[in-house]
Image (tube, rainbow, N blue to C red):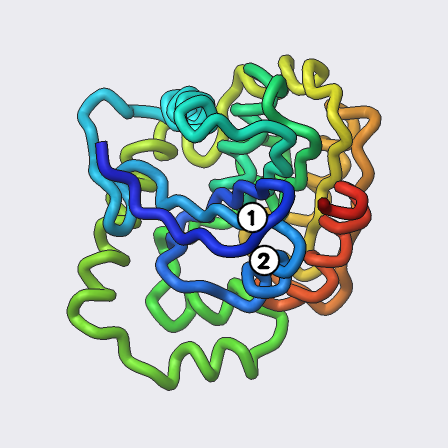
Amino acid sequence: MQVSTLRQGQGQPLLFLHGANGASTWVPLFEELSKNYDVIVPEHPGFGLSDDPDWIRSIPDIAMFYLDFLERLDLSNVALVGTSLGGWIAAEVAVRSTSRLTSLTLVCPAGLRVRGVPIADNFMWGPEEGVRNLFFSQAIADRMLSTAPTEEQLVVLLKNRFATTKLAWEPRAYNPDLEKWLHRIKIPTQVIWGSDDKLIPVSYADRWKERIPHASVSVLGECGHLPHIEKSDVVASKIHQLTGPAQ
């Protein structure tokens, strides 16, 4: 199976698992981290330019795929970072095995459900609303909306949307079995959330902290659902702090 992967840098391997919109471009966070880490950013099976095998049907399947991915690349001492959908995948990886991991950073992760605190239905958002609701800073949203996507980019966006629906629609955006196994995560763990997240309420950070008791929680002010974009320097700093000096 072909997996489209961005990779740059040297040092401790850092595996970044992207959210539902994919990871087809090298963003400032990756550039900053690549100064100290071997940054590896695969597109999940079914997303972007990666193949879409029939046998991957759920987020737990993706998690098992990434355990194989780490084994095939013979990676160890990996700093695992995941955002939104990718945070959910990262947690599913970590509850199964941390033998190749040294730390876990979850950025506004999906995967849990808090009764009485619904997540937003982003499938009901229009295209412009969907962009604006991801950011506190509307200047960032304005810049993104000012450039029309190419036909190729539209094809990728549609593919990513189909893949997200296939993997995370029923039940939507969470795994009812994940919560009870989060205690298995013993490596250093942090949860980062934007205070103004309109997709997954910031109060979800408390549930992650309850289920991974040793995890630290950082809430970033004036930040939406994508802290790795909106507050990339802060996120990079917190990853450095968690992992220690990369060699």
Secondary structure under tag 2 reads loop
User: What amino acid is found at the position of numbered circle 1 in the picture?
Assistant: Asp
Q: Quadrant of the N terminus?
A: top left
Q: Position of residue 88 (x, y in %)?
A: 53, 34
Q: Secondary structure at mark 1?
A: strand
Asked whether the beta carbons under mark 1 and mark 2 sit within 8 Å of each other, the answer is: yes
**Residue 35 occupies quadrant:** bottom right
Residue ID for mark 2: 34
Relative to 1, is 20 above or below?
Answer: below
Residue at 70% over, 33% down = 103
Mark 1 nearby-residue class (10 Å; few <14, some 14–19, many ≥20): many
- Quarter of the rendering occupied by the C terminus: top right
Q: How far apart are labels 1 and 2 at the CA level?
A: 6 Å
Please state if 163 lies on the left or on the right of 98 as rendered. Answer: left
In this view, the residue in front, 142 or 91, is 91
Identify which residue is drawn at 35% across, 40% down: 44
Q: Amino acid at mark 2?
A: Ser
From the top left corner, tell me how far across and down residue 175 is, in percent: 49, 24
Disc 1: which residue: 38
